[in-house]
Amino acid sequence: MTKILSVSKLYLALSVFIIVCFTSVFPSCSTANLSDVKICSSLTSSECNSDVSSLPGDVPVIYCSAILKNAPSNTKVTFEWKHDGESMGKAEVETESGVVKSTLRPNSTLEPGNYSVTLKIDADNVAPISKEFTIE
């Protein structure tokens, strides 16, 4: 009987050890993902109705919206806005599954050129998504 208890304790200890090791090696794995990333200058409801690839330099606001799926509450999504590869600023949104969006409000007329916004879920196994657009 004591041999059975010893083996049971050993299995229990080994199981706890494996769980602790696995969660420390893979702390931020996630099934969360982004889709339907769009750029626009006006929202319908809370998201971009259509995706535009070019905007005028005097646009007062630029939105980026996406659908976040399989995300628990307090999932962090970072948006980084860039012009010709140089960062213009970042915004971090904490949310759960649903529409996620960020806004760029230029202080003045934007220079013509190539712009992008990169969306990144705060998890090690999720690749960032970049959406490019131009200002004319």
Image (tube, rainbow, N blue to C red):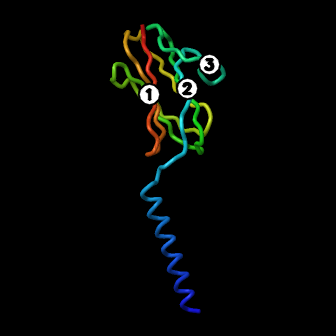
Closest to the observer: 125 or 104? 125
Secondary-structure class at tag 1 = strand
**What is the crowding at mark 1: few (fewer than 14 residues within 10 Å), some, or many (at least 20)?**
some
Q: Is residue 131 left or right of residue 42?
A: left
As shown in the figure, which amino acid type bears the numbered disc 1?
A: Ser
Please determine whether, in this image, residue 40 is positioned above or below residue 58.
Answer: below
Query: Residue 30 at what x, y percent from top left?
Result: 52, 47
Which residue position is annotated with label 1?
A: 130
Query: Residue 4 at what x, y percent from top left?
Result: 57, 87
Please determine whether, in this image, residue 17 is positioned above or below residue 99.
Answer: below
At a point 48% along the width and 74% down the height, the residue shown is 14
Please determine whether, in this image, residue 103 is positioned above or below residue 31.
Answer: above
Secondary-structure class at tag 2 = strand
Q: Quadrant of residue 33?
A: top right
Q: Quadrant of residue 97?
A: top right
As shown in the figure, which amino acid type bears the numbered disc 2?
A: Ser
Q: CA distance from mark 2 to mark 3?
A: 9 Å
Query: Residue 48 at what x, y percent from top left?
Result: 59, 20
Cβ atoms at labels 2 and 1 below 8 Å apart: no
Rendered image: mark on residue 65: 2
At a point 44% along the width and 38% down the height, the residue shown is 127
Q: Quadrant of residue 74?
A: top right
Nearest to N terminus: mark 2 or mark 1: 2
At a point 48% along the width and 49% down the height, the residue shown is 29
Nearest to N terminus: mark 3 or mark 1: 3
Q: CA distance from mark 2 to mark 1?
A: 12 Å
Which quadrant holds the N terminus?
Answer: bottom right
As shown in the figure, which amino acid type bears the numbered disc 3?
A: Asn
Which residue position is annotated with label 3?
A: 49
